[in-house]
Every structure is written in structure tokens, then in C-alpha cells.
Amino acid sequence: MSITENITSILNEIANTQLICVTKTVEPEKMNEAIKAGATIIGENRVQEFEEKADKLLSCEKHMIGHLQTNKVKKAVEYFDVIQSVDSLKVAQEIDKRAEDAGKIQEVYLQVNIGNEPQKHGFKLDDIRQEIGEIESLKNIRVTGMMCIPPYVPPEEARLYFKQMKSLFDELKAETEGKFDNIELKDLSMGMSGDYKVAIEEGATMVRIGSAIFGERNY
Ligand SMILES: *Cc1c(COP(=O)(O)O)cnc(C)c1O
């Protein structure tokens, strides 16, 4: 199937769920084919890779979905409409500082380490409430969603993590609603090529799909 056919069938299948078309390692011509076929949001993992492709791209919304090192934050704020991969208070603080310098209110999501995996980035379930309390003071960011990458397990086993993520999202949404000026949780970004159907069943409002659109990556 072509990129156009893949996009068409996925958009049809996911209906009202938003599609993040994940374009790491994908060249701009192919990204543009996806955009012409109806993808409206692209997701990139590395600031530098995106920078090399940026001026060749058709108009679209841009989301950062990979771990951000502090020294890449300035450029991320310059390029991305949403930074989904805010995985620590430290990164949130750096984004706030850089956004202030740029005169921008940066939209961000909080990435949660839902499987509590030692090697993975993300807010920990035990700490996230306290850390959200500190994010309240960061006036140059606006938190509008949450995202997770569950442990690498078959889709039916990932269901449990998606369920936990949805409960946490609902709880934090209720706890912050109307109380925090800069936090208004709307989007829940979870599910990739292998498990997006399960993620949607469990409450994802946004799925991030790469290989089911562009084919397997060779790395
Ligand atoms: C690569 C990636 C995806 C998409 O993965 P596929 O399995 O190719 O759909 C989604 N989210 C993040 C954070 C990624 O790095």
C-alpha cells in the first residue's frame, strides 16, 4: 500500500481520534505525500533531524515526541507547536525559560513513565502530583495533554497500561480543572502502529503512528 492509501485507511479507521503522523527517518517528500493525503500533524523525535527537513515541508502542525536534552530546548521552542515529551520538571523549567525569551506560550504535554521502567523517561506516578504543583508557577508553558509510551509488550498486555494512563489522566484533569491557570488537560496521546486500536478503545484522543504509514524503519 502507498503512503496515501495508508493515511486514508487509518484516518477512516480512527475516526475522531487525532493522528500524529510520526516522521522520524522519513524524508520530506514522503512527509509531504502524507500531508497531501490528509495528515495534519507530524511528530518528530529529534530537533536536529526536523531542522534539516523543515524548510521543505508543506504546512502542518508540528509536535516534538522524543526526549529533549536541555541544550535542544531553545530550538524545540522555536520549531514545535506542541512539545509532547516533557518528561521531567527540569525540562519543563527550561522550556518555560526559553519560551519567555522567545515571547511565546509553549504548549506542552506531560509524558508519564506509566510502566515505571527504570530506563525510560517520564514523570513517575509517585511524583507527578507534587511536580504538577511546581509546574503551576511556570507561566510561559501551557499544559494541554498527557502522553505515554507503555512497556514494549503485545497490544493486549499494553491495554492495562493504557487503562492506568486513562485513569491517571481523568484524575489529574479533575484535580487541576479550574484551579491551575496554565493547566487544562484535553488530549491523551497514546498508541503506536502496533497497538493504536487498543489505545483508542481505552480512551486515547490522539495516536502516534509511523511504520504503519511509511513502512518499517531499518534501525
Ligand atoms: C517512533 C515513535 C512512534 C511511532 O512508532 P511506530 O511503531 O512506528 O508507529 C510513536 N511515538 C514515539 C514517541 C515514537 O518515538
Image (cartoon, grey):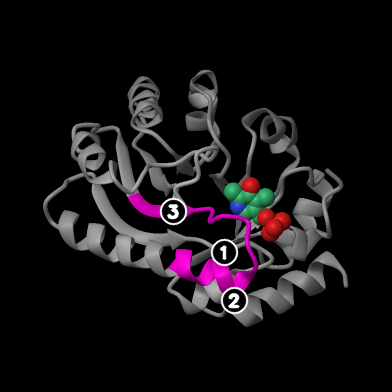
**175 sits left or right of 212 in the view:** left
Nearer-the-camera pick, 151 or 52: 151
Residue shown at the point (25%, 32%) measured from the top left: 138
Alpha-carbon distance for marks 2 and 3? 18 Å
Image coordinates of residue 218 in percent, x first then y, are 87, 47
Q: What residue type is labelled 3?
A: Ile
Q: Is the residue indicated by label 2 positioned so its CB lies within 8 Å of ligand 1?
A: no
**167 sits left or right of 79 in the view:** left
Q: Is the residue indicated by label 3 positioned so its CB lies within 8 Å of ligand 1?
A: no
Alpha-carbon distance for marks 1 and 3? 13 Å
Mark 1 or mark 3: name the one nearer the start of the chain. Answer: 3
Q: Quadrant of residue 1?
A: bottom right
Q: Which amino acid does label 2 sit on?
A: Lys
Image coordinates of residue 102 in percent, x first then y, are 40, 24
Nearer-the-camera pick, 199 or 109: 199
The part of the chain drawn in magenta is: 144-162
Alpha-carbon distance for marks 1 and 2? 7 Å
Mark 2 or mark 3: name the one nearer the start of the chain. Answer: 3
Query: Which residue is under mark 3?
Result: 114
Q: Quadrant of residue 88?
A: top left
Query: Which residue is under mark 2?
Result: 197
Image coordinates of residue 55 in percent, x first then y, are 71, 35
Residue 42 visible in the displayed image: no
